[in-house]
Image (spheres, rainbow, N blue to C red):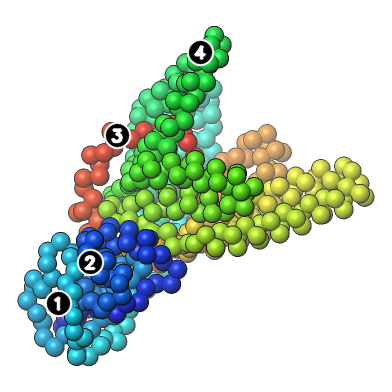
């Protein structure tokens, strides 16, 4: 057993691609003060922490790397006092270079935990058909309960490391949120029938509310999702949401869609970077360049199908419609698989990462066959289609676990107990963001 103590040492190196503004924001979330951040950004060498056992020092190094800071571990000659660094995770800077031996200890053990989905189409069919019948009989009022039952089934049959996810939403909360949305819609329709200017005023008043509504919807879905009894959370701010929903899409339109990949990158970054597991924040490591490369590939596929449709239409007009329909489904499957892989592979949680290997051809095939069977069965194949897609997604997803996962979850269980107090502030109106 390694009984030596280590110091975490910064020598002026940053992770490639991380901007100073992004690094500063990341370090603030880790508890660094403005003066400490300024000193680090100046490139001066600094000792960030002393007196750490090897495992804890590795955790510090990994977290700082996620933030954008490259540090080294150095062995101390003898264990210092327990309170070497100031309390609260602050940094102690040293002017001189230490003369102690630099550590070459290995990284924390890494393993891949597969995501498993154990749902069965025939089993979910019973839930699905009852939901449909009750929604029809109640003129749609049963929809919140149907949503909760559906989510509970899919969450409960999705497992990581032997533990399934939980969906904890109260359908009454969803019902009240949708009643508010329905009342607002009815009010707008009534006003529009009698006073066109009044309807326009109401619409203008509603526009600034959209970012707030999206934030509350994201928070509702997050805090009502849990794994090993640790709830997720969402802590996005209004300004960030306003930029992601209005400003970046507007710039995409003004640039004739040239900024569309960057707009989508900012939206996904807003969602992922503000998501939490307990108190641990997720981090989105993709770049705008990654999104442009992905979109260029999608455009290449689109151009290929357009040329194929033109060729087929010149030979037989009826076949052109079939080719266009197949092309649409193929492009949708290709886009969804590639985008999911990009998002998942760029997301980290503390030391842990995610790996998604959805096959684009396989996704296209599943979408094509699912759509065909749903049409041929007049919709009755829908439960099997959903289960089939969920099973394939899970089979292509793994969690990259570094170190002891049980200790990580136990620590988050202790730190995240206060999150449940905010449940009453959130609501759901059924708005999909991604």
SS for tag 3? helix
Quadrant where the image shows the N terminus: bottom left
**In this image, 35 relative to 220: left or right?**
left
Q: How far apart are the alpha carbons under marks 1 and 2?
A: 20 Å
Disc 2 on helix, strand or loop?
helix
Mark 1 touches mark 3? (CB < 8 Å): no
How many numbered tags mark residues here? 4
Q: Which residue is the extreme one toward the right?
A: 315
Q: Disc 2 or 3, which lies upstream in sequence?
A: 2
Distance in Å between CA atoms under marks 4 and 1: 68 Å
Q: Residues within 10 Å of mark 4 (few under 14, many from 20)?
A: some
User: In this orientation, does residue 233 appear?
Assistant: yes
Say the numbered circle drawn on residue 202: none
Alpha-carbon neighbours of circle 3 within 10 Å: few (<14), some, or many (≥20)? few
Whole-angstrom CA distance, mark 4 to mark 3, is: 29 Å
Q: Earlier in the sequence, mark 1 or mark 2?
A: 2
What residue is disc 2 on?
36
* Image height of 142 relative to 96, above or below: above
Determine the residue positioned at 48% across, 62% down: 286
Q: Write down the residue under mark 3.
A: 425
The residue at which mark 1 appears reads as: 51
Q: Earlier in the sequence, mark 2 or mark 4?
A: 2
Q: Is label 2 or label 4 in front?
A: 2
Q: Is residue 433 left or right of residue 222?
A: right
């Amino acid at each position: 057993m390694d009984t030596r103590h280590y110091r975490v040492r910064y020598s002026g190196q940053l992770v490639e691609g991380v901007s100073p503004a992004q690094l500063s924001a990341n370090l603030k979330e880790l508890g660094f003060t403005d003066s400490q951040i300024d000193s680090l950004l100046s490139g001066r060498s600094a000792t960030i922490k002393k007196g750490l056992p090897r495992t804890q020092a590795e955790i510090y190094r990994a977290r700082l790397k996620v933030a954008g800071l490259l540090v080294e571990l150095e062995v101390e000659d003898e264990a210092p006092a327990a309170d070497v660094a100031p309390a609260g995770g602050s940094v102690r800077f040293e002017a001189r270079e230490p003369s102690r031996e630099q550590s070459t200890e290995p990284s924390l053990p890494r393993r891949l935990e597969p995501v498993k989905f154990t749902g069965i189409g025939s089993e979910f069919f019973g839930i699905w058909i009852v939901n449909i019948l009750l929604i029809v009989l109640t003129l749609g009022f049963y929809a919140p309960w149907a949503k909760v039952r559906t989510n509970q089934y899919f969450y409960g049959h999705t497992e990581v490391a032997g533990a399934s996810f939980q969906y904890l939403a109260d359908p009454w909360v969803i019902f009240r949120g949708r009643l508010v949305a329905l009342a607002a819609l009815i009010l707008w329709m009534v006003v529009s029938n009698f006073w066109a200017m009044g309807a326009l005023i109401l619409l203008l008043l509603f526009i600034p509310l959209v970012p707030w509504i999206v934030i509350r919807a994201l928070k509702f879905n997050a805090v009502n999702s849990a794994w090993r009894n640790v709830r997720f959370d969402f802590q996005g701010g209004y300004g960030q949401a306003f930029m992601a929903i209005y400003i970046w899409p507007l710039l995409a339109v003004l640039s004739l869609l040239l900024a569309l990949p960057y707009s989508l990158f900012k939206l996904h970054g807003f969602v992922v970077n503000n998501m939490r597991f307990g108190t641990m924040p997720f981090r989105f490591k993709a770049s705008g360049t990654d999104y442009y490369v992905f979109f260029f590939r999608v455009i290449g596929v689109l151009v290929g199908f357009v040329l194929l449709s033109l060729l087929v239409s010149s030979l037989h007009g009826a076949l052109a419609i079939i080719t266009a329909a197949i092309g649409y489904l193929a492009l949708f499957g290709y886009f969804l698989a590639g985008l999911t892989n990009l998002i998942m592979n760029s997301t980290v949680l503390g030391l842990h990462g995610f790996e998604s290997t959805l096959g684009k051809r396989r996704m296209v095939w599943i979408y094509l066959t699912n759509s065909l069977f749903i049409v041929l069965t007049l919709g009755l194949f829908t439960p099997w289609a959903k289960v089939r897609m969920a099973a394939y997604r899970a089979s292509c997803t793994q969690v990259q676990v570094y170190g002891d996962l049980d200790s990580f979850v136990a620590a988050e269980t202790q730190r995240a107990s206060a999150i449940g107090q905010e449940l009453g502030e959130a609501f759901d109106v059924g708005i999909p963001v991604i």
